[in-house]
Amino acid sequence: MFFKRNKNNENRVYGLVNNIPERVNWCNDYLEKEDGILNLGVTEKNEVVKVDLNKTPHILIAGGEGVGKSVALACMIWQLKNQGAEINIIGLTYASSVELTNFEKFTNIVRDIDSTDKLLQAIVYEHTRRLNLLRKERVRNFNEYNNKICESNKLPRIVVIIDEINEFLYKENLSADDIEKANRIEHNLNTLARLARPTGINILSATERPEIRILRNQLINNIPVRIYGSRIEGKFSELVVGNEIIRKIGHITGRFVVTIGCEFKETQFYYFNEEEYL
């Protein structure tokens, strides 16, 4: 098997490992016109791995430091921004606050537990409001709603980007007031993960250590797309994809295993150069 170069990627491909290029540079030619479709990268068969947020609404991406999680998230954010989505970024760690700075010009970024609590309460309220609009118009989802009503009243997709999701759910050493907020954050995340697909609200989350004791079953079971990068301990990687394939990928920046349902794809994610596009 080999990677089939074509005119669109001839100058953006670097080397092959496991018959997959070690790097494929992002190009705006890869932007999808259809709302909610994200292009992630390529496989050994030169397939483009796509995620349809209309069908699989939430994503968890996990991997150790240096595997390319932030670059992968940046590429997804860029695609969603170009589709007109309303993007909210939550980052409590110092690394998050630095890495996400370039997105401040076109996203809403919150960096503390109080602001996170208020943001998620507002998004759950918006979810409920949208459900009422769908019932009123007798449509099944926000895409059908947008196709039915006038341009000025269309609903934007709402995306919550959570960098290092464990930080929001790990409750040790918190004050009583912050524990109450953390519990509310967890409850609202669970609500959105379970119910928000038809209202056009999506969660994209990243973590180095996807611990089952922190990522409760209700939350993790409602995230259909799980993406694993290397440099992560085996017991944690099993939570992410539940398959031995994760142990066989090399330590290549941008190399992930994408799981959607029962399907596993080793994928080289696009390299998104923030200096070029932001």
Image (cartoon, grey):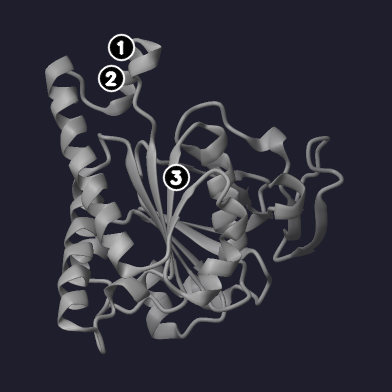
Question: Taking the image as drawn, is residue 273 in sight?
Answer: no
Dot 1 amino acid type: Ile
Report the Cα–Cα distance between label 2 and label 1.
6 Å
Residue at image coords 27%, 73%: 169
Q: Secondary structure at mark 3?
A: strand
Which numbered dot is residue 20? none
Question: Taking the image as drawn, is residue 174 in sight?
Answer: yes
CB of mark 3 within 8 Å of CB of mark 1? no
Left or right of 18 on screen, residue 163: left
Mark 2 or 3, which is nearer the eye? 3
Where is mark 1, residue-wise?
149
CB of mark 2 within 8 Å of CB of mark 1? yes
Residue at image coords 24%, 81%: 171
For marks 2 and 3, the one nearer the N-term is: 3
Dot 2 amino acid type: Tyr
Name the residue at the bottom extreme: 173
Residue 120: give x, y in percent of width and height.
26, 54
Left or right of 41 on screen, residue 17: right
Q: In the displayed structure, would residue 65 be above or below residue 199? A: below
Where is mark 3, residue-wise?
87
Q: Nearer the viewer, residue 147 or 220?
A: 147
Instruction: Name the quarter where the N terminus is drawn.
Output: bottom right
Residue 242: give x, y in percent of width and height.
37, 70
Q: In which quarter of the view is residue 159 placed?
A: top left
Left or right of 205 on screen, residue 72: right
Q: In which quarter of the view is residue 79 placed?
A: top right
Where is mark 2, residue-wise?
145
Residue 272: give x, y in percent of width and height.
69, 53
Report the Cα–Cα distance between label 2 and label 3.
20 Å
